Image (spheres, rainbow, N blue to C red):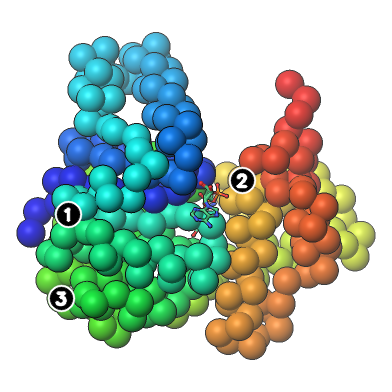
Amino acid sequence: MTIKRIGILGSGIMGSGIAEVAAKSGHEVVLRSRELATAEAMVGGLERSLGKQVDRGKLSDEDRKAVLGRVRATANLHELHDCDLVIESVVEDLSIKKALFKELDLVVKDEAILATNTSTLPVIEMAIETDRPDRVCGVHFFNPAPMMSLVEIVRPLTASDATIATVTAFADACGKDPVEVKDRAGFIVNALLFPYLNNAVRMLENATASRDDIDTAMKGGCNFPMGPLALLDLVGLDTSLAILDALYDEFRDPNYAAVPALRRMVSAGRLGRKSGHGFYDYTKK
Ligand SMILES: NC(=O)c1ccc[n+]([C@@H]2O[C@H](COP(=O)([O-])OP(=O)(O)OC[C@H]3O[C@@H](n4cnc5c(N)ncnc54)[C@H](O)[C@@H]3O)[C@@H](O)[C@H]2O)c1
């Protein structure tokens, strides 16, 4: 099956980014959020992002109009019924994702593939909520999705070869570089990245070095484009905490045990860029 129409669930950082990637690569996109106003705001965000690309000469005005013409916003799950691929990208909470997969399975046409953009959660747990576990897999985009080339294609035990091949071809069609990985918490990137990010918070908590010096050190010393604390703010501290908790649940490795300071920041609503305040303050212009 060739994927033509995509459904996207969730209007957060990742849902919006994936919508832009899919629509720009010629796919029809149906964006579904629980509130119509939020789904429409997501289309508004896409409009602004494409407008900037036109201003910078990276996109023609004709292409901007064509991309927007391929995107539709809805609050009604039933409008995803004729999608070939639905990508779930709601909050990193297994019980919420499982309930959505159960509901999606009843609504979306039989031959469609249901995928999750989870960063760490077991894809198999979502697959077995459906009557099509062979047509469920992970398709893990990176943040910001329009800029990052990697997509991890996550294969739960139940996924068919045809499903993995179809979703890999979709990632290729989006201009991404897909890699295949088994359904293990954190897949490749987050399993390797999060002990490092967690230890950066520990280092700050222990007052080994200041925030700015930790970030400067990892940029200058390892040639990373961002320091670990700025990266945590970009990912979202709530999402990062959920990722660490899922990694720890699966492997019981102390490197994955979230540093208390991170948990306290999430309790305080300091979620990073999306809330205006994390390790850095984003409210100042
Ligand atoms: N932030 C990242 O860097 C990143 C990168 C790759 C993958 N992911 C994954 O993408 C998914 C979404 O993350 P995000 O960063 O876009 O989060 P976000 O906080 O920006 O957005 C979460 C979305 O979930 C929706 N939501 C919350 N509760 C819900 C419910 N009960 N039912 C339906 N929708 C609900 C919210 O309205 C919002 O649209 C997560 O699974 C996350 O692990 C995140």
Q: Which residue is mark 3?
A: 161
* Dot 1 amino acid type: Asp
| Percent of width and height locating residue 106 | 26, 65
Disc 1 from disc 2: Cα separation: 31 Å
Circle 2 sits on which residue? 234
Q: Earlier in the sequence, mark 3 or mark 1?
A: 1
Q: What is the C-alpha distance between the residues marked 3 and 1? A: 17 Å
Tag 2 secondary structure? helix
Question: What is the count of numbered marks?
Answer: 3
Q: Amino acid at mark 3?
A: Asp
Could you tell me which residue is drawn at 63 percent across and 60 percent down?
240
Compared to 248, does 23 lie above or below? above
Between disc 3 and disc 1, the foreground one is 1
Alpha carbon separation for disc pair 2 and 3: 34 Å
| Residue with the most extreme bottom position | 252
**Which amino acid lies under the numbered mark 2 shown in the image of this protein?**
Leu
Q: Residues within 10 Å of mark 1 (few under 14, many from 20)?
A: many
Which badge, 2 or 3, comes first in the chain's sequence?
3
Q: Are marks 3 and 1 in contact (CB under 8 Å)?
A: no
